Amino acid sequence: MSAQESTIGLDLSLTSTGWATCDAYGAIQSKLKGMARLDEISTEVAKIVLKTSKNPVVAIEGYAFAKRSSHAHAQGELGGIIRLNLFRKNIPFVEIPPTNRAKFVTGRGNANKSEVVSHVSAKTGIVWSGSGADDECDAWVLRQMLLAFLEGEDYEHNDIFDLSALDKVDWSALEK
């Protein structure tokens, strides 16, 4: 199975979890609250991951520690649930810091979500629009970073993204 077919990007969020696979991308947007919302999102993520391939590999955006939010604990719970579910199913995953995601696309680690979307659109021609578009784009970028790491010189976008953003990502979870 190729890296193209087995890689998944996840941008976890309580309101709009972005996901990207080899043939699709989207956002899980829950209107539920509390544990019901965590259950709904984690169930949908599990479906996406398990239908992607028999040997999935996942890139998850790491926590944004500087972000001030009243939902920080719930966001942490969602991240913990997703990571635990992947661990229990022996699905390797790597966490990519938000600054590395931004640098990969824009060359700057402090670029905001709209700058990332704009740069991806300009470089690839993919148009991101509608509710959850920035989350879908982030998941797509995370998947591209995973592909760039796994495919090395064979990665199709080596000439348009800043590959130095891969250097400070801890890829050791994929070495098993």
Image (cartoon, grey):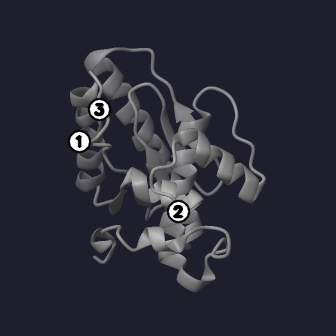
- Residue 172 drawn at (x, y percent): 28, 73
Q: Residue shown at 45%/15% (left/top)?
A: 31
Secondary structure at numbered mark 1: helix
- Residue 6 drawn at (x, y percent): 51, 63
Q: Earlier in the sequence, mark 1 or mark 2?
A: 1
Q: Earlier in the sequence, mark 2 or mark 3?
A: 3
- Front tag of 1 and 3: 3
Q: Marks 1/3: CA distance?
A: 9 Å
Which residue is identified by label 2? 104
Q: Quadrant of residue 100?
A: bottom left
Viewer-nearest residue: 48 or 175: 175
Quadrant including the C terminus: bottom left
Q: Residue shown at 27%/17% (left/top)?
A: 34
Secondary structure at numbered mark 2: helix
Q: Residue shown at 61%/26% (left/top)?
A: 131
Which residue is identified by label 1? 80
Which residue is identified by label 3? 75
Q: Is residue 97 above or below residue 145?
A: above
Viewer-nearest residue: 160 or 143: 160
Q: Earlier in the sequence, mark 1 or mark 3?
A: 3
Viewer-nearest residue: 142 or 165: 165
Neighbour class for label 2 at 10 Å: few (<14), some, many (≥20)? many
Secondary structure at numbered mark 3: helix
Q: Marks 2/3: CA distance?
A: 24 Å
- Front tag of 2 and 3: 2
Neighbour class for label 1 at 10 Å: few (<14), some, many (≥20)? few
Three-letter code for the amino acid on which mark 2 is drawn:
Phe
- Residue 86 drawn at (x, y percent): 30, 52
